[in-house]
Amino acid sequence: MVKTLWLVRKLGDFSSDLVDDEDIVILIQDGVLRFPTKKNWYVCKEDAQARGIKIPENLTKSYEEIADLIVKAKRVIVW
């Protein structure tokens, strides 16, 4: 189970110190401009494609997968 799902729209004011080991971070919108380098960090597949950014498939989550995580997470934070 996901403790907290973080949906991060941009990284400028986001502190990764807030993220626990049981959390998942998904970079969405302009957040996809930064490559996910930490464990349990992913990029929204469709947002990356819309910006012409190529991300390895194992580091992406589709809108459908993100919606599923929203339902399963204990809490969701949009940053």
Image: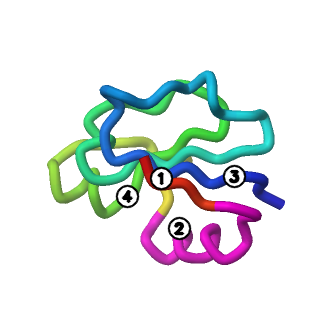
Q: In the rendered structure, which segment of residues is drawn in magenta?
A: 62-75
Q: Nearer the viewer, mark 2 or mark 1?
A: 1
| Residue 57 visible within the image | no
The dot on residue 4 is 3
Mark 4, Cα crowd under 10 Å, few <14 / some 14-19 / many 20+, is many
Mark 3 → mark 1, Cα distance in angstroms: 10 Å
Nearer-N-terminus badge (4/1):
1
Give the amino acid at mark 1: Leu
Dot 3 and dot 1 residues touching (CB under 8 Å): no
Q: Secondary structure at mark 2?
A: helix
Residue shown at 56% from the left, 44% from the top? 25
Instruction: Examine the residues drawn in magenta and state their main secondary structure.
Output: helix
Mark 2, Cα crowd under 10 Å, few <14 / some 14-19 / many 20+, is some
Dot 2 and dot 1 residues touching (CB under 8 Å): yes
Nearer-N-terminus badge (2/1):
1
The dot on residue 7 is 1
Nearer-N-terminus badge (3/2):
3
Nearer-N-terminus badge (4/3):
3
Please give left or right for residue 31 compared with residue 37 in the image. Answer: left
Mark 4 → mark 3, Cα distance in angstroms: 20 Å
Residue shown at 44% from the left, 42% from the top? 56
Q: Secondary structure at mark 3?
A: strand
Membership of 69 in magenta stretch: yes
Residue shown at 49% from the left, 77% from the top? 64
Dot 4 and dot 1 residues touching (CB under 8 Å): no
